[in-house]
Amino acid sequence: MVLIKGLRAAGAAAGLAGDELDESVARTLAFLRRRITGDYTVDEFGYDGDFTEHVALPLLRPLYRDWFRVEVRGAENIPLHGGALIVANHSGTIALDSLMTQVAVHTETPGNRALRMLGADLVFASPVMGPIARKTGSTLATSADAQRLFSEGQLVGVWPEGFKGVGKLYKDRYRLQRFGRGGFVAAALRAEVPIIPCSIVGAEEIAPMLANAAPLARLLGLPYFPLTPTFPWLGPLGMVPLPSKWLIEFGAPIRTDDRGEGAADDPAVVFELSDRVRETIQHTLYNLLRDRRSVFF
């Protein structure tokens, strides 16, 4: 009874009422029962769908819905079934854009598709962040892992700018960095899955990086050490993201099953397709910036 009263109080504080509150309490109790009895599965990558759907995503939704007020366009371009690769721009000093894309995919697709994200080595080296990343669907950004996910019909997300995108200065906002060697394209070509360009506006403004304290970053073993208007001057409070207005657009799928045998091993094909995806994202970013009324509204 005490637990139920506590859950109802927490739900009410979050703005739930009536049937919505009752359903939330029932779902939470069912989740706790499954965790206690072990009635849940974890796949070979460490992905825990039950935890992701009932803990991680609900914690992210207030940020998605109320703080960033994310507006999604082109969700109909995300396949309802089968493997596909979502390729997005990466930015923001604090890499929240991948998480907001994950919430967008789950929220906006019929059947609430899960996005399996490819991440950098540094993410999984963290004793705290690494296990949570794996539990919520991330895995190492390697061709082998991508191929296995595609073979299972999974929707995979990649942010090929990597730390070059997240750690760029505010003066370079919305200018895409190099997309690496096109490994993501080669993986999609081998699996013959469509590539969906994804353009994200809003992340650049959550923690404008005015400078990079490179010596300190090297000392700490980090790819960059940001100096923003609030960090490190306000301490931990300086890490709270600013409430910028976000737009996420999923573009029309680009086919990879019409390139012929051996296309994945042809550098010219890989470069051409990688460049096409990059240009599509860059052009869409300019259009979204034009449509957005202001940074915060």
Image: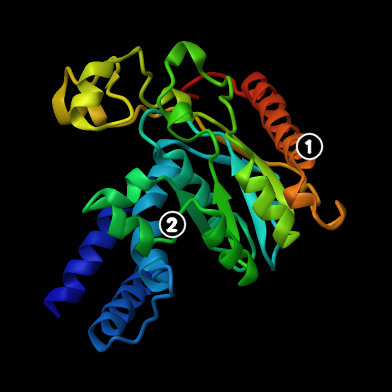
Query: Could you tell me how far apart the alpha carbons at marks 2 and 1 are, in whole angstroms?
Result: 30 Å
SS assignment at label 2: loop
Q: Quadrant of residue 108?
A: bottom right
Q: Are marks 2 and 1 in contact (CB under 8 Å)?
A: no
Residue 293 higher or lower than 157, as above or below: above
Q: Residue at x 41, y 51 (%)?
A: 61
Eye-nearest disc, 2 or 1? 1
Q: Quadrant of residue 169?
A: top left
Q: From the top left corner, tell me how far across and down residue 74 is, in percent.
A: 70, 45
Q: Amino acid at mark 2?
A: Ser
Numbered badge on residue 62: none
Residue carrying label 2: 138
Residue at the left extreme of this rendering: 2
Q: Residue at x 64, y 70 (%)?
A: 151
Circle 2 packing at 10 Å, graded few (<14), some (14-19), many (20+), is many
Residue 68 higher or lower than 139, as above or below: above
Residue carrying label 1: 268
